[in-house]
Image (cartoon, rainbow, N blue to C red):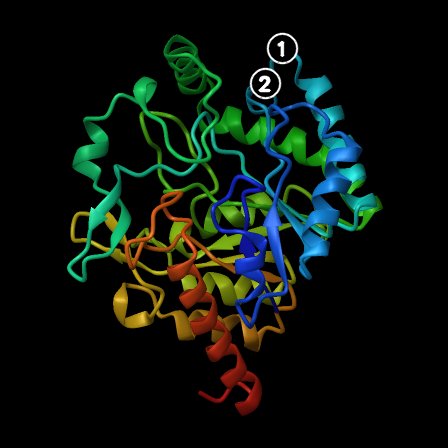
Amino acid sequence: MKMTFRWYGEDDPVTLSKIRQIPCMTGVVTAVYSVPAGEVWPMDDILKLKNTVNGSGLEMEVIESVPVHEDIKLKKGNYKKYIDNYKENIRRLAKAGVKCICYNFMPVFDWTRSRLDYVLPDGSNALVYYKEDVSKMDPTKMTLPGWDASYSPDEIKGLIDEYKELGEEGLWSNLEYFIKEIIPVAAECGVNMAIHPDDPPWSIFGIPRIITDEKNIDRFLSLYDDKHHGLTMCSGSLGCAKFNDYTAMVRKYSAMGRVHFAHVRNIKILDDGSFEESGHMSKCGSLDIVEILKAYYDTGFEGYLRPDHGRMIWGEKGKPGYGLYDRALGAMYMAGIWETLEKTGGKI
């Protein structure tokens, strides 16, 4: 297992020098953020990013994310051009030493929350998803960190209508087409493609979502029989749904060798299915982080792992969910569990 940390580039207040000081850290997970979705990343920009990361004493072996253009998901307009561009990005990143690419196939919106600064009982701030609040939100007027902000409200409404008409089976068909186009290129380049599950793993605003549970992940993996066609297992995404036995899913897919990237965090599931993000420790939420890491250890997981969203603690200001302190605590907590697993042969 290689411990990594999300880094948003030179404008990230969490600098590489700070990340480097976390004792367990081997590298960062990052991207070229200046290029619009669907376009080819300039090789000079990729190499500059790599040299900056390597110069700080860290690796850049994981890219999160290479965004999938909406035309690809809807299989319309310039989708063939954008798929060709996507293939070229895989080739260029491979030349720069990238071994894993995280991506998602979520229509319109990335991860969704109803509030970014909810005050938990201990005084820290966290991201939360309250179903009642989300049901009242206008998706054409929303913005969250990491979302594509280039669409106007009218364009977002148009996209939502198109996806409603497309439906789940249409989205599955378009995903299959995309996978069969890109995985041969990834396999040739030795790059593992790791899809991120939908967050949360259910339909929002009437838009279909399909990477949501064990049945659908089985269907996804069956689209292309190749080890390079795999998963980003995210405990905060799949694990926030009561219908998912997340630890069992980790054990199953890791044993298959199809988990290339792991996001680990804890969440507290509420009675109505809403959830609050919490501290990483098992006692802080609804997930047993020790058992999740044991599932990875028992199945010989050798991929990349990063602490996912963290709370904002100790008065820190920054990108919601992506401060330094709580994620660093989470990384060390998980590194401690992993060291114990290694020293005891998994007998904890």
- In this view, the residue in front, 153 or 120, is 120
Q: Which badge, 1 or 2, comes first in the chain's sequence?
A: 2
> Please, what is the three-letter code of the amino acid marked with disc 1?
Gly
Q: Dot 1: few (<14), some (14–19), or many (≥20) neighbours within 10 Å?
A: few
Please give the name of the residue rendered at 43% of the width and 34% of the height, measured from the top-left corner. Answer: 209
Q: CA distance from mark 1 to mark 2?
A: 6 Å
Looking at the rendered image, the quarter that the C terminus falls into is bottom left
Q: Which residue is mark 2?
A: 71
State the image coordinates of residue 317 (x, y, percent, origin top left).
34, 47
Disc 1 and disc 2 in contact, CB within 8 angstroms? yes
Please give the name of the residue rendered at 59% of the width and 33% of the height, measured from the top-left corner. Answer: 33
Please give the name of the residue rendered at 42% of the width and 66% of the height, measured from the top-left corner. Answer: 330
Q: Secondary structure at mark 1?
A: loop
State the image coordinates of residue 81 (x, y, percent, origin top left).
73, 18
- In this view, the residue in front, 246 or 17, is 17
Q: Please tell me in which quadrant of the rendered image residue 286 appears.
A: bottom left
Q: Which residue is mark 1?
A: 77
Would residue 4 be visible to someone looking at this image? no
Looking at the rendered image, the quarter that the N terminus falls into is bottom right
- In this view, the residue in front, 314 or 74, is 314
Q: Would you place residue 180 above or below residue 345 in this image?
A: above
Q: Is residue 238 left or right of residue 126?
A: right
> Please, what is the three-letter code of the amino acid marked with disc 2?
Asp
State the image coordinates of residue 85 (x, y, percent, origin top left).
74, 25
State the image coordinates of residue 72 (x, y, percent, origin top left).
61, 23
Would residue 213 be visible to someone looking at this image? yes
